[in-house]
Image (tube, rainbow, N blue to C red):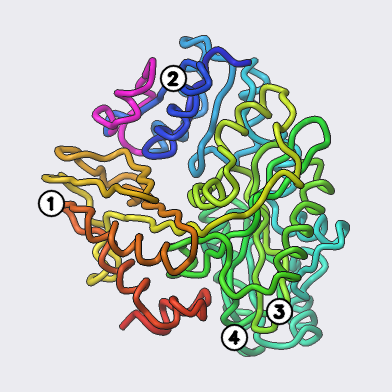
Amino acid sequence: MFQKILIANRGEIALRVIRACRELGIKSVAVYSEADADSMHVALADEAYCVGSARSADSYLKIDQIIAAAEVADVDAIHPGYGFLAENAHFNEVCRASGFEFIGPSPSAMEKLGDKNTARSMAIASEVPVVPGSDGLIESDEIATSVAKEIGYPVLIKATAGGGGKGMRVAPDEETLLTALSQARTEAEAAFGNGGVYLEKYVGNPRHIEVQVIADHHGNVCHLFERDCSVQRRHQKLIEEAPSPNLPEDQRVAICDAAVRMIRGAAYTNSGTVKFIVDENNDFYFIEVNARIQVEHPVSEMVSGVDLIKSQILVAAGEPLSFKQEDLVCTGHAIECRINAEDPSKGFRPNPGMIKKFFAPGGIGVRFDSHVYGGYSVPPYYDSMIAKLIVYRPTREEAISTMRRALKEMQVEGIETTAAFHDMVLQHKDFIEGQHDTKWVERELMD
């Protein structure tokens, strides 16, 4: 077992890993930027090292500085969290070459699955349904128009690298295809340093359903059931829940089995998420694999009873999973709201600043993952998420009721947050009936 782990991240996920380490009897090492000197993860870790100035490019993305901190602290392993360097295959390789175990998949698996076009080919090889589209990257305008005619408009242009909606465009007809193609390539090159794109048939108003998986080095692969992440705004998730509402049981089984086939076929180890879109007929299609822990992993933990962060650490240390698929039962219902320092009334504009008063919600069925406190100043340099509010109750109806209570109980003064917006979503008839999709927020709730 590891004796000491460095967490190459910040905020609530760094705190989450620190807590898991402490329960496992492992010492934790935090890294932080100058802007995060007063962050809770710095205070609660066993050791902490400053790795640069405020900008993430000068701190949390500085591989040499993070490795130097790991060497000074004499750690055994590095946990990347999510975001920043979590899906950077080069960082993965550098960690291992420097003598530190990387708590995640192998660099080769990460690199292959990080390329959406390669991942699509791997899905096909594992008999996982994919959206009709191009066989590979689009190398010319002529190929683009030919593929689009074959699969039919509208088509979706997708960057092969990265995520978050960047390098993605919908072309409703041939007239707009080439312009959209050029825009997607330019945006992808700027965001990811890779302008490669491919085409898929555009599936309008789908649900976003993903499957949490974990695999060890002994051939064991398990899924922790599915999550519904359809409440989104501009491809950014707002609310996640498990299990997915209104998904027929046969499709629930099929989508989870497909995720396991995908992970086995990729020779993947550690935690990962296989993402799908589901159309109005409940047919599902593979999108991509996120080769890391995700923001919304708590809802899967709640319904499965599995601590994913501890499992990640144990798997990386060479331990077999302590459970098999038949041991896992999906019980109850979990919902997570991402609490962001944003002003929904102003187009979700980030609203960093000093938190003057902060009351965390609690009570039966409430879990609150956060790194903020009264007197903490939310920096403007990073993602605006300040907390994850998770509830777990026997039924979805009870979970919605408990979440609404917890949202009202949480008090934050000094900055604007998305809490009231989440409450508006939760009391909407479409959400209550599970009739929302990935375009629902923009279609029904935005001016």
Q: Is 330 on the left-hand or right-hand side of 324?
A: left
Q: Is 390 on the left-hand or right-hand side of 204?
A: left
> Considering the numbered disc 1 on the image, is that residue within a helix, a strand or a loop?
loop
Disc marking residue 176: 4
Q: CA distance from mark 4 to mark 1?
A: 45 Å
> Which residue is label 3 attached to?
201
Residue located 44% across and 69% down the image: 397
Is tag 3's residue or tag 4's residue first in the polypeptide sequence?
4
Mark 4 in CB contact with mark 1 (< 8 angstroms): no
> Considering the numbered disc 4 on the image, is that residue within a helix, a strand or a loop?
helix
Q: Amino acid at mark 4?
A: Thr
Mark 1 in CB contact with mark 3 (< 8 angstroms): no
> Which residue is label 2 attached to?
29
Mark 4 neighbour density, 10 Å: few (under 14) some (14–19) many (20 or more):
few
**Quadrant in which the C terminus is drawn:** bottom left
- Of labels 4 and 1, the one closer to you: 1
Residue located 64% across and 41% down the image: 271
Mark 2 neighbour density, 10 Å: few (under 14) some (14–19) many (20 or more):
many
**Quadrant in which the N terminus is drawn:** top right
- Give residue 253's position: percent from left, percent from top: 75, 63
Residue 74 sits above or below residue 227 on the image? above
- Of labels 3 and 4, the one closer to you: 3
Q: CA distance from mark 3 to mark 2?
A: 46 Å
Q: Amino acid at mark 1?
A: Gly
Q: Amino acid at mark 2?
A: Val
**Nearer-the-camera pick, 446 or 387:** 387
- Give residue 440's position: percent from left, percent from top: 46, 79
- Of labels 3 and 2, the one closer to you: 2
- Dividing the picture into quadrants, the one containing residue 280 is bottom right
Is tag 1's residue or tag 3's residue first in the polypeptide sequence?
3
Residue 25 sits above or below residue 302 on the image? above
- Of labels 1 and 3, the one closer to you: 1
